[in-house]
Image (cartoon, rainbow, N blue to C red):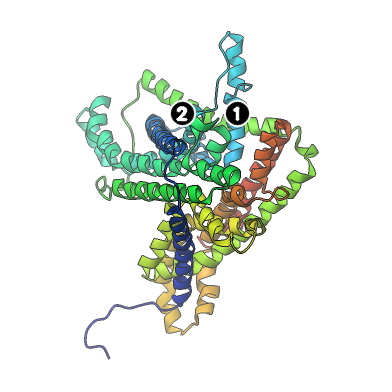
């Protein structure tokens, strides 16, 4: 019998599978990084082209973060103080670019803003030259397309967390819109904006597919694109490893900046009342908010609409190589999803039971290390023993799993912690075995979260154009790589139809797995 009060533990499931999963992820990420670092010692130093790639990487990431956050502020403010039909659907739409395949978005942007795009056709009617989308401005535009919705969601959440009592007090004091901006809204933005900008900066640092398709030459080359070129064109492993090491350092520094910039300070307590905005009731304010909401929706919807319209005519005449690539992508996505569930479920349970440190480190490494860095390390490790092309698909699936793991942990851990807290003591009292706890207690009550995590992983894996570019065999390709090859061969009609197929498969896989997880699941 204990001599004093003791904390009640919940050893209803074994934690050693989670520990093994975390160690496996650490070994994969750190092992490849060690291989990269060892090879980097033999590099010849930074050349002029490498410095140019480093400068362009930092410039495009900085501009993308500033523009995404800067444009997101008025959009989020308009959504925060306006109520209209379709508002909830529009906010939901803001999450779509996150699972949208990059190559699909690029084709959509080209259809709208390219030399032969809709905007250039309109400009030609008034004698204005067509737009030039390739280069720095094209890369930044694509990054804003992907990250403007993310920044808007983050900033909108900050607006929604302001207690309604602050706005009520401002109304009682007869405070005008200018006073409300400086006293209520601006302090919130000072807390939210640095973290949002740092997160987007970190995401844009590891840009590969965007720079590959829209870079437009040596002057618009990111570090990850330079790694790919060192493999694909020069086969210079030392230079590729050196660039990968620099990329790793930049990504870790950006991740630390994002963590440091994220504040834990609250915005004050309230009574959870609905926020009623008294500011912005004037005609000009309503017009300005409407313009921002309409422009943001148009910027997001037009590229997607163009992909559908351009791809439909050629969808039924796609070459056999596209359908073969689609089958390969489905196989890679399936393998990535299965690997994620094998790793994420025990790891999430281990974190939920309090074994946080090792599991959280494994999750953070998935964000800190870019896919091409891990791919570079795996290439260096297997090259002396086996042709890396033979391992292209398994390696791609493995890296996709590591990249999706941090998001899966954020989805699964809170729910597992809640279920274990509510049911763990009863399972312990009934002396349930770990397998029985998983089968009867955990899995049925976490089906919705498992389906969401699986759908997110499948969609991200289907749209990935990263590691496969390092290992791909000329005869074997995933669907995103096949779309890029069709674009390079100027077969734009087939590329647009293949992009539509990829878009449908990605959205369909996410919807099917997410809906399957929520079907008859306990909320």
Residue 63 location (% of width, % of height): 40, 32
Up the image or down, 456 lies above or below 118; here it is below
Front residue of this view, candidates 460 and 129: 129
Q: Which residue is mark 1?
A: 110
Looking at the image, do the residues carrying marks 1 and 2 touch, with CB atoms under 8 Å apart?
no
Label of residue 293 in the image: 2
Q: Secondary structure at mark 1?
A: helix
Residue 452 in view (yes/no): no
Q: Which of the 4 image quarters holds residue 409?
A: bottom left
Number of numbered discs visible in the structure rendering: 2
* Quadrant in the picture for the N terminus: bottom left
Identify the residue at image location x=45%, y=79%: 427
Residue 368 image position (x, y, % from top left): 42, 53
Q: Residue 367 versus residue 426: which sits nearer the camera?
A: 367
Q: Is residue 464 visible?
A: yes
Above or below 49: residue 133: above
Query: Which quadrant of the view contains residue 228?
Result: top right
Where's residue 208, x and y in %?
A: 52, 42
How packed is label 1: few (under 14 Cα within 10 Å), some, or many (20 or more)?
A: many
Q: Tag 2's secondary structure? A: helix
Q: Position of residue 340 (x, y in %)?
A: 54, 62
Hey, which residue is sitting farthest bottom in the picture? Answer: 1
Q: Earlier in the sequence, mark 1 or mark 2?
A: 1
Q: Local crowd at mark 2 within 10 Å, few (<14), some, or many (≥20)?
A: many
- Report the Cα–Cα distance between label 1 and label 2: 23 Å
Work out whether residue 429 or residue 48 is closer to the camera in this orientation and state it: 48
Q: Which residue is nearer to you in this view: 288 or 484? A: 484
Q: Mark 1 against mark 2, which lies toward the viewer?
A: 1
Give the residue displayed 34% in from the left and 25% down from the top. 280
């Amino acid at each position: 019998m204990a001599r004093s009060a003791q904390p009640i533990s919940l050893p209803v499931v074994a934690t050693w599978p989670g520990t093994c999963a975390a160690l496996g992820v650490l070994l994969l990420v750190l092992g490849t990084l060690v291989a990269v670092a060892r090879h980097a010692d033999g590099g010849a130093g930074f050349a002029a082209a490498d410095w140019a790639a480093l400068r362009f990487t930092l410039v495009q990431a900085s501009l993308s973060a500033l523009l995404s956050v800067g444009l997101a502020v008025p959009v989020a403010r308009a959504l925060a103080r306006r109520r209209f039909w379709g508002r909830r659907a529009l906010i939901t739409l803001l999450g779509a670019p996150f699972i949208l395949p990059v190559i699909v978005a690029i084709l959509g942007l080209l259809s709208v803003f390219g030399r032969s795009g809709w905007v250039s056709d309109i400009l030609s009617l008034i004698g204005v030259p067509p737009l030039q989308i390739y280069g720095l401005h094209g890369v930044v535009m694509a990054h804003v397309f992907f990250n403007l919705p993310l920044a808007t969601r983050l900033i909108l959440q900050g607006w929604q967390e302001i207690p309604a009592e602050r706005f009520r007090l401002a109304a009682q004091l007869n405070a005008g819109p200018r006073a409300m901006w400086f006293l209520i809204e601006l302090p919130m933005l000072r807390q939210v904006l640095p973290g949002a900008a740092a997160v987007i900066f970190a995401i844009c640092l590891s840009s590969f597919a965007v720079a590959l398709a829209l870079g437009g030459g040596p002057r618009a080359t990111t570090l990850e694109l330079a790694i790919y070129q060192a493999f694909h064109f020069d086969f210079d492993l030392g230079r590729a490893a050196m660039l990968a090491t620099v990329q790793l350092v930049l990504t870790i520094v950006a991740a630390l900046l994002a963590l440091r910039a994220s504040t834990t300070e609250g915005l004050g307590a309230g009574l959870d009342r609905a926020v009623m905005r008294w500011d912005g009731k004037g005609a000009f304010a309503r017009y300005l908010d409407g313009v921002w909401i309409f422009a943001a929706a148009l910027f997001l919807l037009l590229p997607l609409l163009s992909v559908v319209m351009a791809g439909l005519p050629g969808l039924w005449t796609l070459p056999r190589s596209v359908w073969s690539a689609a089958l390969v992508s489905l196989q890679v996505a399936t393998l990535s999803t299965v690997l994620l569930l094998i790793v994420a479920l025990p790891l999430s349970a281990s974190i939920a039971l309090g074994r946080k440190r090792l599991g959280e480190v494994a999750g953070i490494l998935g964000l800190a290390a870019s896919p091409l860095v891990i791919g570079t390390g795996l290439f260096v490790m297997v090259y002396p023993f086996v042709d890396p092309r033979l391992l292209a698909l398994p390696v791609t699936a493995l890296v996709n799993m590591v990249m999706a793991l941090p998001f899966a942990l954020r989805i699964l851990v809170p729910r597992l912690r809640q279920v274990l807290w509510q049911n763990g003591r009863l399972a312990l009292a009934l002396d349930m075995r770990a397998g029985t706890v998983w089968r009867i207690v955990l899995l049925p009550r976490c089906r919705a979260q498992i389906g969401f995590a699986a759908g997110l992983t499948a969609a991200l894996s289907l749209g990935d154009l990263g590691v496969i570019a390092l290992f791909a065999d000329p005869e074997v390709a995933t669907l995103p790589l096949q779309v890029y090859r069709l674009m390079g061969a100027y077969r734009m009609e087939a590329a647009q139809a293949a992009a539509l197929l990829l878009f449908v498969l990605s959205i369909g896989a996410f919807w099917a797995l997410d809906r399957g997880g929520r079907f008859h699941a306990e909320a």
